[in-house]
Image: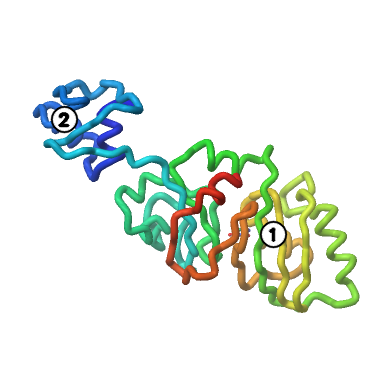
């Protein structure tokens, strides 16, 4: 990795300020002053800034319990970005793996590992996402088996030619269901229920792959993923 990028990723410095420190001769690599921003930092190189050891921060993997009225976006807009809930350096340089609507709550995964998030969100990899859904209208009990079959076969969404991929519908009560889907089409869950003439009035993501939302996290709280959770993707 380039030295200016290493400094920027491992400290509070912006890239421009990292370059200034370099030009002022404040940075050493294995005891030698390096002024070249493009200097390649090897894995075992000891980098110091004004004599203080600068440890490589490494990649970050986070789960967050998204509250309502926040955005899965890298900028604050009409609502604040979920990234503003992370009280860590350079939170806005992270990215969100799989977005939720402003009014959807629950599990959001955030990282700076592009390959990892690609494995989570790529349409060619099958990764189930389970949602707890509250419905405006009760599902007719007599049609339960038919509906489960319909969701398993695929639903025609408005404006789409192909059917949705097989989804698992679990009916908990006439107005509460669990739905597991493997795709991430725009407003997919809401559109699937709209296609059967119903309306989603509450949507909460509980699980992505085998990573379940930690029940100890209240809305707006987050934690780093465990190594097992990271390796599960
Ligand atoms: N499906 C939706 O309709 N909204 C979400 O936020 C996620 C899935």
Q: Work out which quarter of the rendered image holds the N terminus and state it.
A: top left
Q: Could you say where residue 222 lies in the image, as x and y percent from the top left?
A: 44, 61
- 21, above or below 66, in the image: above
What residue appears at the point 18 percent right and 36 percent down from the top-left corner?
17
Q: Could you say where residue 115 lies in the image, as x and y percent from the top left?
A: 53, 36
Q: Could you say where residue 217 lies in the image, as x and y percent from the top left?
A: 48, 68
- Residue under pointer 1: 191
Ligand 1 closer than 8 Å to label 1 CB: yes
Q: Separation of disc 1 and disc 2 at Cα?
A: 54 Å
* The disc label shown at residue 27, or none: 2
User: The residue tagged with tag 2: helix, strand or loop?
Assistant: strand
Q: Work out which quarter of the rendered image holds the C terminus and state it.
A: top right
Ligand 1 positioned in quadrant: bottom right
| Mark 1 vs 2, N-terminal side | 2
Ligand 1 closer than 8 Å to label 2 CB: no
- 17, above or below 180, in the image: above
The answer to whether residue 81 is left or right of residue 40 is right
């Amino acid at each position: 990795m380039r030295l200016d990028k290493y400094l920027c990723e491992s400290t509070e410095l912006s890239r421009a300020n990292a370059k200034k420190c370099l030009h002022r001769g404040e940075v050493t690599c294995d005891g030698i002053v390096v002024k070249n921003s493009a200097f390649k930092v090897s894995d075992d190189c000891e980098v110091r800034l004004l004599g203080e050891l600068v440890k490589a921060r490494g990649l970050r993997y986070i789960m967050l319990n998204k509250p309502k009225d926040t955005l899965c976006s890298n900028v604050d807009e009409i609502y604040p970005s979920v990234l503003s809930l992370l009280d860590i350096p350079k939170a806005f340089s992270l990215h969100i793996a799989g977005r939720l609507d402003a009014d959807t709550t629950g599990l959001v995964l955030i990282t700076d590992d592009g390959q990892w998030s690609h494995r989570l969100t790529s349409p060619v990899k099958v990764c189930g996402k389970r949602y707890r859904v509250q419905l405006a209208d009760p599902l007719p009990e007599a049609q339960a088996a038919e509906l489960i079959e319909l969701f398993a076969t695929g639903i025609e969404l408005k404006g789409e030619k192909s059917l949705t991929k097989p989804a698992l519908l679990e009916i908990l009560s006439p107005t509460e269901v669990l739905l597991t889907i493997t795709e991430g089409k725009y407003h997919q869950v809401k559109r699937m229920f709209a296609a059967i003439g119903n309306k989603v009035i509450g949507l909460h993501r509980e699980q992505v792959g085998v990573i379940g939302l930690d029940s100890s996290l209240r809305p707006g709280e987050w934690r780093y993923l465990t190594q097992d959770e990271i390796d599960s993707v």
